[in-house]
Image (tube, grey):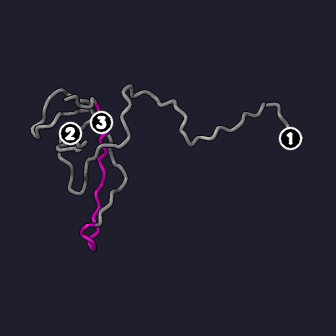
Amino acid sequence: MSHPQSYEILVIPQFTDAKEADASGTGRTIRSAVVEATGATGESGYPRYAGEGMVADIDPATHTVEAILVDGSELDYGLTARISERPVRENHGPDNRVPDNHVTEPSVPENHTDG
C-alpha cells in the first residue's frame, strides 16, 4: 500500500462545554508542522512521519494522528493533533497562484489625471 509522503499536522486546543457533554469545539491552531515519511513504522503500528519538531504515527487510511511527540514531549492535556484538510504542496515553495476569489484591479497609468 502506498502512503502519502507528507502531511501538515495542526495542534489545536480542544474545548468542552461543561453544560453539554457532547458540545465541543476547537480553537485556533497554536502550532503546525509539515512532516515527511521516515520509512519506519511507529510503535502504534502506523507509518512514522517527522519534521519541524514533531514525530507522529499517522493512519494513512483515516488520516488520523495515532501517536505524536512535539519537541520530544507528549501533548499537554486539552490539546489535540489533527491533519490539515489542505493538501501539502510537494515543493514547499511560494504559492504564486491567484486565489479564485481574487479581483484584479485595472491598472492606471502613472501620468493619468481626472481632469
Name the residue type under label 1: Asp
Q: Is residue 10 magenta?
A: yes
Q: Which structural element holds mark 1?
A: loop
Image quadrant in which the C terminus is located = top right
Above or below, 10 relative to 20 = above
Labels 1 and 3: the sequence-earlier one: 3
Q: Is residue 14 magenta?
A: yes
Classify residue 110 as left or right of residue 21.
right
Residue that carries the numbered disc 1 in the rendered image: 114
Above or below, 26 relative to 73 = below
Q: Which structural element holds mark 2?
A: strand
What is the span of residues highlighted in magenta in the rendered image? 6-22
In percent of width and height, residue 113 lies at 85, 37
Q: Nearer the viewer, residue 105 or 115?
A: 105
Classify residue 58 as left or right of residue 103.
left
Q: Residues within 10 Å of mark 2 (few under 14, many from 20)?
A: many
In percent of width and height, residue 43 lies at 9, 38
Classify residue 110 as left or right of residue 7.
right
Q: Residues within 10 Å of mark 1 (few under 14, many from 20)?
A: few
Residue that carries the numbered disc 2 in the rendered image: 58
Residue that carries the numbered disc 3 in the rendered image: 7
Labels 3 and 2: the sequence-earlier one: 3
Mark 3 and mark 2 in contact? Answer it, CB < 8 Å.
yes
Q: Which structural element holds mark 3?
A: strand
- Number of marks drawn: 3
